[in-house]
Amino acid sequence: MRPRLAPRSLAGRLTLLLLLALLVAQGVAVFLFAGERIAAVRHAHRDNLVSRVGAVGRMLQDTPRALHGAVVAAASTGLVRFSVTREPLVGETGSGGRAAAIAYDLSVALDVGRERVRVAPLWRRHGRDDGEGHWRVGDGGRDRVHDRHRGPGRWRHRWLAASVAMRDGRWLNVAAGPPPGAPPWGMAFVLSFLLSALGVAIVAVLMGRRISKPMRSLATAADRLGRGEEVGDLPETGSLESQSTVRAFNLMRERLDRFVRDRTAMLAAISHDLRTPIASLRLQAEFVEDEETRTRIVAALDEMQRMTEDTLAFIREDARREETRTVDLHALIDSVAADLADLGHEIAVSESGFGRVLIVCRPAALRRAFRNLLENAGIHGVRARAWIVEDDARPRVVIEDEGPGVPEADLERVFEPFVRLDGSRSRGTGGTGLGLAIARTIVRGHGGDIRLENREGGGLRVTVALPGAGDA
């Protein structure tokens, strides 16, 4: 399964979205201001070059000629090289605007005529050592760029050459390297971005958690409601959307509670009122002279009486609103099996092998569900065995018997109320067909489910899946 790189929570997604927006905004700012920063650095470099050439030129004019060599050597560096020659290094000023601007600045700095200053690009063959034959001065060097395949290097004109006429007829030449680069990702930008990102992340996490809090409360309440627990009205807080969602949930919960109460009251009333006509029919059946007919009528009335009592018992337990608690599932099943063993049922409970299995449930209701399942297995399967399997912290209770099983077509139908299968579930056992229906209702009310399947060697296997304690 491929890992999810994007966060799944609202706070995480909001934080990521704001950080991406901040990164894009900072990137656009760098793109817009980096050009201006580099232009400012180049302008400062040009001013510095003009000032330096002007200072060297004035110094040469004010010092004896014998010291000119020492002055030129002292003024030269790796990126600015001075020389004094009889012929100018630059034949004529280049046609570019940058060369003309530097030539004008030099003429002003040295207080000489514009015609006595010449500036042109200096072409250098990249990839070779400095030396004779690897430098070209002037615009003519542009043509040599296309000759890059004739040698191992190629020509670049990032250097600049200038020649200034001196009073003694010689020329002061200067070869200046390119201006230093201005990195757009300076330390100030990095610190600014990190501080901004930290502030945005803190605010986004706090706001995201505050915004998502009503949704988390709503999810918890919906899960508890689905498990059959009693849930009160949630506070309508947060944004307008959150308030409207919580308000709709509260209204839905109230309608469900009212519907369940009305349905329970109606069933209880019907089941209670049936007692009187059943008792009356039982008295009248005693006056039937035919013994066989009287026996059948009394048996039918007894069955109706049991169905009515079971229905009333289920309604009373459902209406009791038992509180949820954390219990040990193995201990609960073991106690149910022990009670049934006292009644003569042969039911074995195997050890789980991994300690206690804690679940959050309504103990009395879940105990009733497992009693119905284990009793059903003990009556119809002769011998039964139960054990617990825990997968991904979700326990499953498996119950197997050695009975005749259930036809494949009826594996789902047996969960319907008052359904009994003549072939595998005899009427002589006294069952009313409500045991499996009640068990599945209780288990599903806890967020689980029940599945039936026939064993290959004969018998029925019942698998009860329940949520773990961490899912509550």
Image: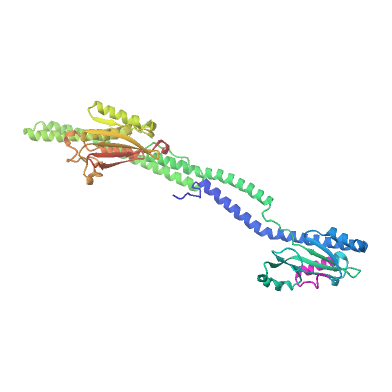
Query: Does residue 398 appear in this view?
Result: yes
Residue 261 falls inside the magenta stretch: no
Residue 397: x and y, percent?
32, 36
Q: How is the image coloured?
A: rainbow
Q: Position of residue 67 (x, y in %)?
A: 91, 61
Quarter of the image with the C terminus in it:
top left
Q: Is residue 277 visible?
A: no
- Bounds of the magenta segment: 88-106
Left or right: 67 in relation to 452: right
Name above or below for residue 30 compared with residue 280.
below
Q: Residue at x 69, y 60 (%)?
A: 35
> Who is closer to the viewer here, 162 or 410?
162
Q: Quadrant of residue 38?
A: bottom right
- Identify which residue, 150 or 325, lies in the foreground: 150
Q: Is residue 156 left or right of residue 15?
A: right
Count of numbered badges drawn on the protein: 0
Give the residue at the far left of this rendering: 289
- 229 vs 136: above or below: above
- Horizontal and vertical percent position of residue 199: 61, 46
Q: Which residue is at a point 27% across and 31% down the rendered structure image?
A: 348
| Place of residue 108 in the rendered image (x, y in percent of width and height, measured from the top left) | 85, 66
Q: Quadrant of residue 336?
A: top left
The answer to if 96 sits in the magenta stretch is yes
Q: Nearer the viewer, residue 404 or 274?
A: 404
